[in-house]
Image (cartoon, rainbow, N blue to C red):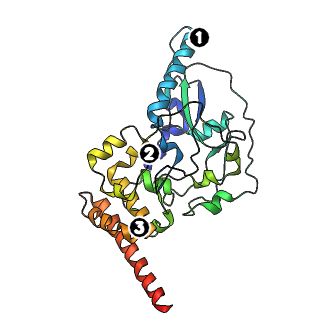
Amino acid sequence: MRYLENEKRADPRLVLPECKSILVLAMPYENSEFRIQNSEFKIASYALTEDYHNVIPPKLKQIVEFIEEQVGHEIPNRYYTDTGPILERELAARAGLGWIGKNSMLIHPRHGSFFLLAEILLGIEIEPDEQIISDHCGTCTRCLRACPTGCILPTRQIDARRCISYLTIENKAEIPADLRPQMGNWIFGCDVCQQVCPWNRFSTRADSAPVQIDAALQPADLLLSPIEFNRRFKRSPIQRAKRRGLLRNLAVAVGNGKNKIHLPLLEKAAQDEEALAREHAQWAIQKIEQASACDKIRKGRT
């Protein structure tokens, strides 16, 4: 993720030369607790509704317009939600929205970490809030112990090369073979470190009912056509993985399920036009066949 090295991230004035203040906001989303009706797979909670890149920017624009009405003139501004070259979590911590936890997520003592961040850079000075929230992770290490791939480091950093969220979304290439078995049935993102965090007992429910996305994927979706993929996920965060990435992720999850009934689907998927989908489907076939052979050996010994 080389884009994170953008030098502008360290100085907002390189993004907006007139910047004098930054308004940092948080929008809660529902904690699904892995429950997706009629699905065999796990998807990160935020991805079960309309893509926040479509939802949040119009709200930020409305806030800017409201501020301009109050001061009586236009204000130089830029606003982002996970798209601009700025240090979102660090700015949010400085604004008093929480502390950066051991899982590298921003955590609020009353709202947990199930929220999305957004920022508005403004060309006017506004009175800053005090940074009053201190670190409350204490000696807890639940997130480090629960991470399926061990990607959470003791330094409050993430080894993205091992993170399931990175592997299933940002990663556009093959998933390393040694990590595939550890991914279980996650097919887009991962919430494990948030689910085990004690502070998420207090996570806030979203104020409004978001637009739900048909994310109830099944093994049969290994044969999802390009047209059907675009139709189902047109306004979903899942679109970011692209069809080949989603089929790759599905193949790994199906392979980890080790159910022989899915071999015919995998054999068809192994003929897909996308090389990425073919390779992971072939891996899943081998995984299931190996598990089946081991079962026969064990049964022969009993």
In the rendering, at what x and y percent does residue 251 appear?
38, 62
What element does badge 2 sit on? helix
Tell me the CA gap for discs 3 and 2: 32 Å
Is label 1 or label 3 in front?
3
Tell me the CA gap for discs 1 and 2: 36 Å
Earlier along the polypeptide chain: callout 3 or callout 2? Answer: 2
Relative to 266, say whether 232 is above or below: above
Q: Using residue 237 as the reference point, say whether residue 157 is left or right of it.
A: right
Relative to 72, say whether 115 is above or below: below
For badge 2, the amino acid type reads: Tyr
Q: How many marks?
A: 3
Q: In this view of the protein, can residue 279 be seen by the observer?
A: no
Quadrant of the rendered image containing residue 69: top right
Earlier along the polypeptide chain: callout 1 or callout 2? Answer: 2
Earlier along the polypeptide chain: callout 1 or callout 3? Answer: 1
Is label 1 or label 2 in front?
1
For badge 3, the amino acid type reads: Gly
Where does label 3 land, which residue? Answer: 255
Q: Nearer the viewer, residue 226 or 262?
A: 262
Is label 3 or label 2 in front?
3
Where does label 2 land, which residue? Answer: 3
For badge 1, the amino acid type reads: Gln
Q: In this view of the protein, can residue 218 be seen by the observer?
A: yes
Proximity of marks 1 and 3: CB atoms separated by less than 8 Å: no
What element does badge 1 sit on? helix
Residue at image location 50% in from the left, 30% down from the top: 56
Residue at image location 28% in from the left, 67% down from the top: 267
Where does label 1 land, which residue? Answer: 70
Relative to 58, say whether 6 is above or below: below
